[in-house]
Protein backbone atom coordinates (compact mmCIF):
# COMPACT_ATOMS: atom_id res chain seq x y z
CA UNK A 1 0.00 0.00 0.00
CA UNK A 2 1.30 3.47 -0.91
CA UNK A 3 0.82 6.15 1.73
CA UNK A 4 0.90 9.91 1.20
CA UNK A 5 1.84 12.58 3.73
CA UNK A 6 -1.89 13.24 4.14
CA UNK A 7 -2.16 9.76 5.67
CA UNK A 8 -1.69 8.89 9.34
CA UNK A 9 -1.46 5.09 9.57
CA UNK A 10 -1.33 4.83 13.36
CA UNK A 11 -4.20 7.30 13.81
CA UNK A 12 -6.32 5.44 11.26
CA UNK A 13 -5.61 2.07 12.92
CA UNK A 14 -6.49 3.54 16.31
CA UNK A 15 -9.77 4.93 14.99
CA UNK A 16 -10.65 1.54 13.51
CA UNK A 17 -9.75 -0.20 16.76
CA UNK A 18 -12.00 2.08 18.81
CA UNK A 19 -14.89 1.53 16.40
CA UNK A 20 -14.55 -2.24 16.82
CA UNK A 21 -15.56 -2.02 20.51
CA UNK A 22 -12.99 -4.67 21.49
CA UNK A 23 -13.51 -6.16 24.98
CA UNK A 24 -10.22 -5.53 26.86
CA UNK A 25 -8.81 -8.44 28.84
CA UNK A 26 -5.31 -7.00 28.59
CA UNK A 27 -3.46 -4.06 30.10
CA UNK A 28 -3.76 -1.20 30.96
CA UNK A 29 -5.83 -2.01 33.99
CA UNK A 30 -7.98 1.11 33.90
CA UNK A 31 -9.93 -0.61 31.05
CA UNK A 32 -10.53 2.45 28.95
CA UNK A 33 -11.02 4.59 32.02
CA UNK A 34 -13.83 2.54 33.57
CA UNK A 35 -11.55 1.50 36.43
CA UNK A 36 -10.65 5.01 37.50
CA UNK A 37 -13.42 7.60 37.30
CA UNK A 38 -11.30 10.47 38.65
CA UNK A 39 -8.60 9.89 36.03
CA UNK A 40 -11.25 9.68 33.29
CA UNK A 41 -12.90 12.91 34.45
CA UNK A 42 -9.53 14.66 34.42
CA UNK A 43 -8.17 13.40 31.07
CA UNK A 44 -11.39 12.64 29.22
CA UNK A 45 -12.99 9.41 27.98
CA UNK A 46 -11.44 9.57 24.51
CA UNK A 47 -7.95 9.86 25.97
CA UNK A 48 -8.40 6.87 28.27
CA UNK A 49 -9.91 4.75 25.50
CA UNK A 50 -6.94 5.55 23.29
CA UNK A 51 -4.49 4.47 25.99
CA UNK A 52 -4.15 0.90 24.77
CA UNK A 53 -1.60 -1.90 24.72
CA UNK A 54 0.33 -3.24 21.72
CA UNK A 55 -1.78 -5.70 19.72
CA UNK A 56 -1.54 -7.07 16.20
CA UNK A 57 -3.77 -4.48 14.49
CA UNK A 58 -1.83 -1.66 16.19
CA UNK A 59 1.69 -3.05 15.62
CA UNK A 60 4.57 -3.07 18.14
CA UNK A 61 6.99 -0.20 18.69
CA UNK A 62 9.92 -2.51 19.48
CA UNK A 63 9.57 -4.47 16.23
CA UNK A 64 7.22 -2.58 13.90
CA UNK A 65 5.93 -4.48 10.88
CA UNK A 66 2.67 -2.73 9.94
CA UNK A 67 1.10 0.61 10.89
CA UNK A 68 3.95 1.92 13.06
CA UNK A 69 6.43 0.88 10.38
CA UNK A 70 4.37 2.74 7.77
CA UNK A 71 4.13 5.82 9.99
CA UNK A 72 7.90 5.79 10.54
CA UNK A 73 8.48 5.50 6.79
CA UNK A 74 6.26 8.54 6.23
CA UNK A 75 8.22 10.42 8.90
CA UNK A 76 11.52 9.52 7.24
CA UNK A 77 10.21 10.83 3.94
CA UNK A 78 8.89 14.04 5.52
CA UNK A 79 12.21 14.74 7.27
CA UNK A 80 14.41 13.74 4.32
CA UNK A 81 15.94 10.77 6.17
CA UNK A 82 16.58 7.17 5.17
CA UNK A 83 14.97 5.83 8.34
CA UNK A 84 13.02 7.23 11.29
CA UNK A 85 12.23 5.77 14.69
CA UNK A 86 9.35 6.85 16.91
CA UNK A 87 10.63 7.38 20.45
CA UNK A 88 8.53 7.51 23.61
CA UNK A 89 11.38 8.17 26.04
CA UNK A 90 11.82 11.79 24.99
CA UNK A 91 14.70 13.21 23.02
CA UNK A 92 16.84 12.13 25.95
CA UNK A 93 16.23 8.60 24.69
CA UNK A 94 16.91 9.65 21.10
CA UNK A 95 20.22 11.35 21.96
CA UNK A 96 21.36 8.41 24.03
CA UNK A 97 20.43 5.83 21.38
CA UNK A 98 22.24 7.95 18.79
CA UNK A 99 25.47 8.11 20.81
CA UNK A 100 25.32 4.47 21.86
CA UNK A 101 24.82 3.41 18.24
CA UNK A 102 27.87 5.38 17.07
CA UNK A 103 30.35 4.77 19.91
CA UNK A 104 31.38 1.83 22.04
CA UNK A 105 33.18 1.79 25.38
CA UNK A 106 36.53 3.55 25.20
CA UNK A 107 35.85 5.17 21.83
CA UNK A 108 36.02 8.95 21.47
CA UNK A 109 33.16 11.34 20.72
CA UNK A 110 33.95 14.95 19.79
CA UNK A 111 31.27 17.21 21.22
CA UNK A 112 30.62 20.71 22.56
CA UNK A 113 30.62 20.97 26.34
CA UNK A 114 27.31 22.89 26.34
CA UNK A 115 25.35 19.72 25.57
CA UNK A 116 22.22 18.57 27.34
CA UNK A 117 22.81 16.21 30.25
CA UNK A 118 21.35 13.34 28.19
CA UNK A 119 24.48 13.29 26.02
CA UNK A 120 26.89 13.01 28.95
CA UNK A 121 24.55 10.50 30.60
CA UNK A 122 25.01 8.33 27.51
CA UNK A 123 28.77 8.39 28.08
CA UNK A 124 28.26 7.34 31.70
CA UNK A 125 26.18 4.39 30.54
CA UNK A 126 28.22 3.12 27.60
CA UNK A 127 31.74 4.24 28.48
CA UNK A 128 32.54 6.37 25.43
CA UNK A 129 35.05 9.15 26.10
CA UNK A 130 34.25 12.81 25.38
CA UNK A 131 36.59 15.13 23.54
CA UNK A 132 35.16 18.53 24.38
CA UNK A 133 35.23 21.47 22.00
CA UNK A 134 34.65 24.59 24.05
CA UNK A 135 31.93 26.64 22.36
CA UNK A 136 32.45 30.22 21.35
CA UNK A 137 31.42 32.91 23.80
CA UNK A 138 29.64 36.23 23.39
CA UNK A 139 31.08 38.51 26.06
CA UNK A 140 28.10 40.85 26.17
CA UNK A 141 25.58 38.06 26.61
CA UNK A 142 27.90 35.77 28.56
CA UNK A 143 26.44 32.70 26.85
CA UNK A 144 28.02 29.73 25.06
CA UNK A 145 27.61 29.75 21.29
CA UNK A 146 28.16 27.01 18.71
CA UNK A 147 31.39 25.32 17.63
CA UNK A 148 33.61 26.99 15.05
CA UNK A 149 34.82 24.84 12.15
CA UNK A 150 38.43 25.66 13.06
CA UNK A 151 37.94 24.34 16.60
CA UNK A 152 36.35 21.17 15.27
CA UNK A 153 39.27 20.73 12.85
CA UNK A 154 41.70 21.09 15.76
CA UNK A 155 39.81 18.43 17.75
CA UNK A 156 39.91 16.07 14.76
CA UNK A 157 43.63 16.65 14.22
CA UNK A 158 44.33 15.87 17.87
CA UNK A 159 41.94 12.89 17.96
CA UNK A 160 41.98 11.22 14.53
CA UNK A 161 40.65 8.02 16.10
CA UNK A 162 37.36 9.65 17.21
CA UNK A 163 34.28 7.86 15.91
CA UNK A 164 31.80 10.72 15.71
CA UNK A 165 31.09 14.41 16.24
CA UNK A 166 27.99 15.62 18.11
CA UNK A 167 26.54 19.02 17.18
CA UNK A 168 23.75 21.07 18.80
CA UNK A 169 21.40 22.37 16.09
CA UNK A 170 20.43 24.83 17.52
CA UNK A 171 21.57 25.53 21.09
CA UNK A 172 18.92 26.35 23.68
CA UNK A 173 19.39 30.03 22.80
CA UNK A 174 18.80 29.42 19.07
CA UNK A 175 22.45 29.58 17.93
CA UNK A 176 23.70 27.29 15.17
CA UNK A 177 27.15 26.09 14.13
CA UNK A 178 28.21 25.72 10.49
CA UNK A 179 26.69 22.26 10.36
CA UNK A 180 27.20 21.59 6.67
CA UNK A 181 30.93 22.36 6.84
CA UNK A 182 31.31 20.25 9.99
CA UNK A 183 29.60 17.32 8.24
CA UNK A 184 31.90 17.61 5.22
CA UNK A 185 34.94 17.84 7.49
CA UNK A 186 33.89 14.85 9.60
CA UNK A 187 33.12 12.65 6.61
CA UNK A 188 36.53 13.39 5.09
CA UNK A 189 37.99 11.87 8.26
CA UNK A 190 35.57 8.90 8.32
CA UNK A 191 33.68 10.20 11.33
CA UNK A 192 29.91 10.18 11.80
CA UNK A 193 27.98 13.34 12.60
CA UNK A 194 25.26 13.16 15.24
CA UNK A 195 22.91 16.12 15.61
CA UNK A 196 20.96 17.04 18.73
CA UNK A 197 17.94 18.82 17.25
CA UNK A 198 15.86 18.87 20.40
CA UNK A 199 14.98 22.47 19.53
CA UNK A 200 15.14 22.22 15.74
CA UNK A 201 12.10 20.32 14.45
CA UNK A 202 10.97 23.39 12.52
CA UNK A 203 14.22 23.51 10.53
CA UNK A 204 12.79 20.66 8.42
CA UNK A 205 9.53 22.37 7.52
CA UNK A 206 9.89 26.14 7.85
CA UNK A 207 11.16 28.63 5.29
CA UNK A 208 14.34 30.68 5.72
CA UNK A 209 15.43 28.50 8.62
CA UNK A 210 18.94 27.26 9.48
CA UNK A 211 19.88 24.03 7.71
CA UNK A 212 18.50 20.83 9.25
CA UNK A 213 20.65 17.85 10.17
CA UNK A 214 19.45 15.63 7.35
CA UNK A 215 19.70 18.42 4.75
CA UNK A 216 23.29 19.04 5.88
CA UNK A 217 24.15 15.37 5.31
CA UNK A 218 24.41 14.35 8.97
CA UNK A 219 24.26 10.66 9.80
CA UNK A 220 21.79 10.78 12.69
CA UNK A 221 19.56 13.42 14.26
CA UNK A 222 17.48 13.44 17.44
CA UNK A 223 14.37 15.55 16.85
CA UNK A 224 12.20 16.66 19.75
CA UNK A 225 8.80 16.67 18.07
CA UNK A 226 7.00 17.67 21.26
CA UNK A 227 9.00 20.89 21.72
CA UNK A 228 8.27 22.70 18.48
CA UNK A 229 6.55 20.05 16.34
CA UNK A 230 3.19 19.78 18.08
CA UNK A 231 3.22 16.20 19.41
CA UNK A 232 2.70 15.21 23.05
CA UNK A 233 5.37 15.77 25.67
CA UNK A 234 7.94 12.95 25.79
CA UNK A 235 7.52 11.99 22.12
CA UNK A 236 10.51 12.25 19.80
CA UNK A 237 11.90 10.99 16.50
CA UNK A 238 15.36 9.59 15.79
CA UNK A 239 16.44 10.06 12.17
CA UNK A 240 19.10 8.07 10.31
CA UNK A 241 20.91 8.79 7.06
CA UNK A 242 22.18 6.54 4.30
CA UNK A 243 25.35 5.37 6.08
CA UNK A 244 23.63 4.05 9.20
CA UNK A 245 22.57 0.45 9.85
CA UNK A 246 19.02 1.14 11.00
CA UNK A 247 18.44 -2.44 12.16
CA UNK A 248 21.35 -2.12 14.57
CA UNK A 249 20.03 1.25 15.78
CA UNK A 250 16.68 -0.37 16.52
CA UNK A 251 18.46 -2.95 18.67
CA UNK A 252 20.26 -0.20 20.58
CA UNK A 253 16.99 1.68 21.09
CA UNK A 254 15.41 -1.47 22.51
CA UNK A 255 18.13 -1.77 25.15
CA UNK A 256 16.56 1.09 27.09
CA UNK A 257 13.21 2.11 25.61
CA UNK A 258 10.04 0.72 27.18
CA UNK A 259 8.33 -2.34 25.72
CA UNK A 260 5.00 -0.69 26.59
CA UNK A 261 5.03 2.21 24.16
CA UNK A 262 2.23 4.70 24.81
CA UNK A 263 -0.19 4.89 21.89
CA UNK A 264 -1.09 8.39 22.98
CA UNK A 265 2.52 9.40 22.26
CA UNK A 266 2.90 7.23 19.16
CA UNK A 267 -0.30 8.49 17.55
CA UNK A 268 0.61 12.08 18.44
CA UNK A 269 3.86 11.69 16.50
CA UNK A 270 1.94 10.38 13.50
CA UNK A 271 -0.61 13.21 13.63
CA UNK A 272 2.05 15.91 14.21
CA UNK A 273 4.15 14.66 11.28
CA UNK A 274 1.08 14.82 9.03
CA UNK A 275 0.31 18.36 10.17
CA UNK A 276 3.88 19.56 9.60
CA UNK A 277 4.15 17.88 6.20
CA UNK A 278 0.93 19.55 5.03
CA UNK A 279 1.04 22.87 6.90
CA UNK A 280 4.59 23.32 8.21
CA UNK A 281 5.54 26.32 6.11
CA UNK A 282 2.50 28.28 7.22
CA UNK A 283 2.88 27.18 10.85
CA UNK A 284 6.49 28.33 11.14
CA UNK A 285 5.98 31.46 9.06
CA UNK A 286 3.48 32.56 11.72
CA UNK A 287 5.79 31.57 14.59
CA UNK A 288 8.74 33.48 13.09
CA UNK A 289 6.58 36.56 12.49
CA UNK A 290 5.42 36.53 16.13
CA UNK A 291 9.01 36.17 17.36
CA UNK A 292 10.35 38.90 15.05
CA UNK A 293 7.64 41.29 16.22
CA UNK A 294 8.27 40.53 19.91
CA UNK A 295 12.04 40.89 19.45
CA UNK A 296 11.65 44.34 17.88
CA UNK A 297 9.18 45.56 20.49
CA UNK A 298 11.24 44.30 23.44
CA UNK A 299 14.35 46.01 22.07
CA UNK A 300 12.37 49.27 21.84
CA UNK A 301 11.73 49.08 25.59
CA UNK A 302 15.41 49.68 26.30
CA UNK A 303 17.51 47.80 28.85
CA UNK A 304 16.61 44.38 27.49
CA UNK A 305 18.42 42.91 24.49
CA UNK A 306 16.41 40.43 22.42
CA UNK A 307 19.26 39.22 20.24
CA UNK A 308 19.09 37.68 16.81
CA UNK A 309 20.59 37.51 13.35
CA UNK A 310 22.65 40.68 13.80
CA UNK A 311 25.14 38.59 15.84
CA UNK A 312 25.82 36.10 13.03
CA UNK A 313 29.59 36.03 12.43
CA UNK A 314 30.08 33.02 10.16
CA UNK A 315 31.97 31.20 12.92
CA UNK A 316 30.64 30.05 16.34
CA UNK A 317 27.47 32.12 15.74
CA UNK A 318 26.96 30.83 12.21
CA UNK A 319 23.18 31.08 12.07
CA UNK A 320 20.19 31.88 14.27
CA UNK A 321 16.76 30.34 14.81
CA UNK A 322 14.35 33.27 14.38
CA UNK A 323 11.56 31.49 16.28
CA UNK A 324 13.56 31.67 19.52
CA UNK A 325 12.81 34.72 21.65
CA UNK A 326 16.04 34.90 23.65
CA UNK A 327 16.37 38.04 25.77
CA UNK A 328 19.37 39.31 27.72
CA UNK A 329 18.23 40.83 31.03
CA UNK A 330 21.39 41.68 32.95
CA UNK A 331 21.46 45.33 31.85
CA UNK A 332 18.31 46.04 33.89
CA UNK A 333 20.02 44.57 36.96
CA UNK A 334 17.98 41.34 36.97
CA UNK A 335 19.11 37.81 36.37
CA UNK A 336 17.12 35.92 33.79
CA UNK A 337 15.78 33.59 36.45
CA UNK A 338 14.49 36.61 38.40
CA UNK A 339 12.55 37.86 35.36
CA UNK A 340 11.33 34.28 34.81
CA UNK A 341 10.00 34.10 38.38
CA UNK A 342 8.36 37.54 38.27
CA UNK A 343 6.63 36.76 34.96
CA UNK A 344 5.19 33.57 36.42
CA UNK A 345 4.37 34.72 39.95
CA UNK A 346 3.16 38.26 39.24
CA UNK A 347 1.84 38.09 35.68
CA UNK A 348 0.84 34.42 35.20
CA UNK A 349 3.16 34.08 32.20
CA UNK A 350 5.19 30.89 31.95
CA UNK A 351 8.26 31.13 29.74
CA UNK A 352 10.67 28.31 28.90
CA UNK A 353 13.55 29.20 31.19
CA UNK A 354 15.62 31.87 32.85
CA UNK A 355 19.30 31.57 33.67
CA UNK A 356 21.91 33.92 35.09
CA UNK A 357 21.55 36.58 32.44
CA UNK A 358 18.88 35.58 29.91
CA UNK A 359 15.35 34.34 29.41
CA UNK A 360 13.89 32.24 26.61
CA UNK A 361 10.29 32.24 25.45
CA UNK A 362 9.24 29.50 23.03
CA UNK A 363 7.05 30.99 20.29
CA UNK A 364 4.76 28.86 18.12
CA UNK A 365 1.79 29.20 15.82
CA UNK A 366 -0.32 28.14 18.81
CA UNK A 367 0.33 31.50 20.44
CA UNK A 368 -1.99 34.46 19.97
CA UNK A 369 -1.16 38.05 19.16
CA UNK A 370 -2.83 39.22 22.38
CA UNK A 371 -0.56 36.94 24.41
CA UNK A 372 2.54 38.26 22.66
CA UNK A 373 1.43 41.80 23.56
CA UNK A 374 0.84 40.71 27.14
CA UNK A 375 4.40 39.36 27.39
CA UNK A 376 5.87 42.58 25.99
CA UNK A 377 3.83 44.84 28.27
CA UNK A 378 4.66 42.70 31.31
CA UNK A 379 8.36 42.94 30.56
CA UNK A 380 8.01 46.71 30.24
CA UNK A 381 6.36 46.88 33.65
CA UNK A 382 8.96 44.58 35.21
CA UNK A 383 11.68 46.94 33.99
CA UNK A 384 9.84 49.93 35.46
CA UNK A 385 9.16 48.30 38.83
CA UNK A 386 12.20 46.11 39.43
CA UNK A 387 15.18 47.45 37.42
CA UNK A 388 18.31 48.16 39.47
CA UNK A 389 22.04 48.60 39.13
CA UNK A 390 23.77 45.56 37.61
CA UNK A 391 26.98 45.94 39.63
CA UNK A 392 28.15 42.66 41.16
CA UNK A 393 26.15 40.40 38.86
CA UNK A 394 27.73 37.21 37.50
CA UNK A 395 28.47 37.98 33.85
CA UNK A 396 28.82 34.61 32.11
CA UNK A 397 26.94 31.35 31.81
CA UNK A 398 29.67 28.98 30.70
CA UNK A 399 32.90 27.92 32.42
CA UNK A 400 35.42 25.86 30.47
CA UNK A 401 35.81 22.53 32.28
CA UNK A 402 39.02 20.72 33.07
CA UNK A 403 38.33 17.04 32.36
CA UNK A 404 40.44 14.81 34.60
CA UNK A 405 38.83 11.41 33.95
CA UNK A 406 36.08 9.91 31.75
CA UNK A 407 32.49 10.40 32.96
CA UNK A 408 31.82 6.67 33.41
CA UNK A 409 34.96 6.10 35.48
CA UNK A 410 34.18 9.07 37.71
CA UNK A 411 30.49 8.28 38.16
CA UNK A 412 31.16 4.66 39.22
CA UNK A 413 34.27 5.41 41.30
CA UNK A 414 34.50 5.34 45.08
CA UNK A 415 33.17 8.68 46.23
CA UNK A 416 32.87 10.86 49.29
CA UNK A 417 30.27 13.52 50.02
CA UNK A 418 31.63 16.88 51.14
CA UNK A 419 30.23 20.45 51.30
CA UNK A 420 30.29 22.10 47.88
CA UNK A 421 32.05 25.12 49.37
CA UNK A 422 34.94 22.87 50.47
CA UNK A 423 35.29 20.97 47.18
CA UNK A 424 37.63 23.22 45.19
CA UNK A 425 40.41 21.22 43.54
CA UNK A 426 38.53 17.92 43.83
CA UNK A 427 37.22 15.75 40.99
CA UNK A 428 33.45 15.79 40.64
CA UNK A 429 31.72 12.40 40.82
CA UNK A 430 28.22 13.47 39.78
CA UNK A 431 26.30 16.21 37.95
CA UNK A 432 25.38 19.73 38.99
CA UNK A 433 23.11 21.73 36.68
CA UNK A 434 20.35 24.28 36.45
CA UNK A 435 17.18 22.86 34.93
CA UNK A 436 16.15 24.01 32.47
CA UNK A 437 18.25 24.09 30.31
CA UNK A 438 19.88 20.95 31.74
CA UNK A 439 23.42 21.78 30.58
CA UNK A 440 25.77 20.57 33.34
CA UNK A 441 27.76 23.13 35.30
CA UNK A 442 29.78 20.15 36.46
CA UNK A 443 29.85 16.64 35.02
CA UNK A 444 31.48 13.50 36.45
CA UNK A 445 35.24 13.56 35.98
CA UNK A 446 35.65 17.35 35.91
CA UNK A 447 37.78 19.40 38.29
CA UNK A 448 35.87 21.64 40.69
CA UNK A 449 37.20 25.21 40.83
CA UNK A 450 36.59 28.30 42.92
CA UNK A 451 34.88 29.94 39.92
CA UNK A 452 32.49 27.02 39.52
CA UNK A 453 31.63 27.09 43.23
CA UNK A 454 30.90 30.83 43.01
CA UNK A 455 28.68 30.20 39.99
CA UNK A 456 26.72 27.45 41.79
CA UNK A 457 26.21 29.62 44.87
CA UNK A 458 25.15 32.59 42.72
CA UNK A 459 22.68 30.47 40.74
CA UNK A 460 21.17 29.14 43.97
CA UNK A 461 20.96 32.65 45.43
CA UNK A 462 19.11 33.92 42.35
CA UNK A 463 16.61 31.08 42.51
CA UNK A 464 17.73 28.72 39.72
CA UNK A 465 16.31 25.22 40.07
CA UNK A 466 19.37 23.06 40.71
CA UNK A 467 19.51 19.32 40.06
CA UNK A 468 21.95 16.44 39.64
CA UNK A 469 23.47 15.78 43.04
CA UNK A 470 22.49 13.00 45.42
CA UNK A 471 22.01 15.71 48.03
CA UNK A 472 18.55 17.09 47.25
CA UNK A 473 19.45 20.38 48.97
CA UNK A 474 22.49 20.86 46.66
CA UNK A 475 24.69 21.64 49.68
CA UNK A 476 27.03 18.65 49.39
CA UNK A 477 28.70 17.11 46.37
CA UNK A 478 30.14 13.67 45.67
CA UNK A 479 33.83 13.79 44.83
CA UNK A 480 36.09 11.02 43.56
CA UNK A 481 38.11 9.53 46.42
CA UNK A 482 41.86 9.22 45.92
Image (cartoon, rainbow, N blue to C red):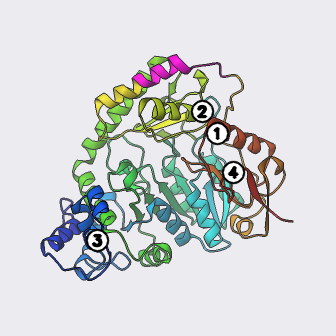
Q: Is residue 328 above or below residue 219?
A: above
> Marks 2/4: CA distance?
21 Å
N-terminal label among 2 and 4: 2
Q: Is residue 35 above or below residue 284?
A: below
Please give left or right for residue 443 compared with residue 252 in the image: right
Residue 35: image tag: 3
Residue 196: image tag: none
N-terminal label among 4 and 1: 1
Residue 397: image tag: 1
> Marks 4/1: CA distance?
19 Å
2 and 4 marks in contact (CB < 8 Å): no
Closer to the eye: label 4 or 1: 4
Circle 2 residue:
357
Which residue is rendered at x = 45% and y = 38% of the image? 351
Circle 4 residue:
474
> Marks 1/2: CA distance?
8 Å
1 and 3 marks in contact (CB < 8 Å): no
Residue 394, quarter of the rendered image:
top right
Closer to the eye: label 1 or 3: 3
Instruction: Give the extent of the magenta segment.
Output: 377-390
Please give left or right for residue 208 compared with residue 389 in the image: left
- Residue 165 point in image, percent of width and height: 58, 59
Amino acid sequence: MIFKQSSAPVLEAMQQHLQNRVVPFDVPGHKGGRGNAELTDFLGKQCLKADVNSMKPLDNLCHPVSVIKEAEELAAEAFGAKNAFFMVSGTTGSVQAMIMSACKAGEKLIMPRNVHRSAINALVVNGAVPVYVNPGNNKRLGIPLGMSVNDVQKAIDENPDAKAILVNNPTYYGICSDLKSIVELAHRHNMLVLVDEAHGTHFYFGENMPVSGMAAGADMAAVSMHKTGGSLTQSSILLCGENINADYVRQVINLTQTTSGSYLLISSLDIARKNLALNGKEIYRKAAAFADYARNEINRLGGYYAFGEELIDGKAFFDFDRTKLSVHTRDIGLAGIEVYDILRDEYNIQIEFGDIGNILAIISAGDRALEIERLISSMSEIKRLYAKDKAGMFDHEYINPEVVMPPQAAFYSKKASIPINESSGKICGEFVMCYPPGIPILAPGEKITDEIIRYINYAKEKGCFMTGTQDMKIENINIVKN
